[in-house]
Image (cartoon, helix red, strand yellow):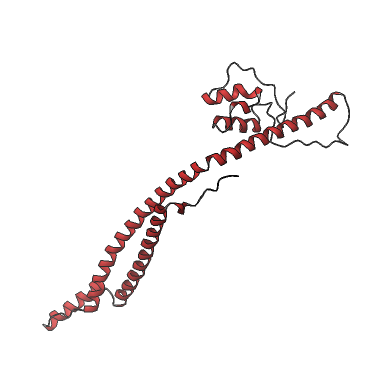
Amino acid sequence: MAQKIDIRLERDPRYVAATAKLTELKTELNALERQQNDVLSGLNSMGSIHRDKIEQEAAAMLSDTPAQENPNRETLTRTLNELTHRLAVVRKAVEMQLAMVAELRAEVGKAIATDLLPQHLAIVTRIAEAVLQLDSVLQEEHSLRDALYENNVPYSAVLRSTQFPGFGSLRSPSSRVAGFILSLYEDDLIPLSKIPEKLIPWAKAKKHRDPPASTPAMPAADADGWQA
């Protein structure tokens, strides 16, 4: 029975703490943005600060009286400046925390994937064995029909062809199934002992990324990857 492995990112307390902090920062950011919008609405309802102050000072000059300050406007303006600064700080903090969470996600994810390597390898091994078995029975079925054809026996009205479109045959190194098996060996997921004998030269060459120069060319395959 496969060992039960915790595949949640939250299994790492650092990730839990980092995401919690990110949520806290985003909550504060949303609250600050709402406050900023409220202050801007309040200021806009008072008209242009610059225009009003000019008009007030001009009127005061004409009447030889001191210009009256609007304490509410001054308070809102000061609040707006404070909010603008705080928003810049929190936005930067969110950006930095996002990077930290992404870094931890990559680190914890790699650890989880590493823990799962044995299970994954076991599954891939079973896949390779199933592919090899399927290829074997497909070849057996093909050989049966081929023998009938060689003996000029009409069989299409009785025996249904069970070709697997696109699967091909391991007798052809250029077939899709051969490419799949060779890629498993190239990635060290299956040993050379699992490779069909005819594909061994190509398997060895794949390790060096070179075509097998001394290997004779394979005969042309039909649409399903079968060869004579």
> Is residue 199 or residue 62 the one in the foreground?
199
Residue 155 occupies which quadrant of the picture? top right
Percent position of residue 198, x then y: 66, 22
> Is residue 15 or residue 165 the one in the foreground?
15
Residue 86 occupies which quadrant of the picture? bottom left
Percent position of residue 118, x then y: 54, 39
Compared across the picture, whether 12 is left or right of 65 comes to right
Tell me the residue at 73%/25% (across/down).
227
Q: Is residue 26 above or below residue 112?
A: below
Tell me the residue at 67%/21% (across/down).
218
Looking at the rendered image, the quarter that the N terminus falls into is top right
Residue 133 occupies which quadrant of the picture? top right
Looking at the rendered image, the quarter that the C terminus falls into is top right
Compared across the picture, whether 156 is left or right of 116 comes to right
Total marks placed = 0
Percent position of residue 16, x then y: 42, 56
Percent position of residue 81, x then y: 25, 67
Q: Residue furthest left?
A: 64
Tell me the residue at 19%/74% (across/down).
54
Q: Is residue 198 above or below residue 86?
A: above
Q: Residue furthest top?
A: 214
> Is residue 6 or residue 42 the one in the foreground?
6
Q: Residue furthest front?
A: 1
Q: Is residue 216 above or below residue 40?
A: above
Tell me the residue at 46%/44% (across/down).
111
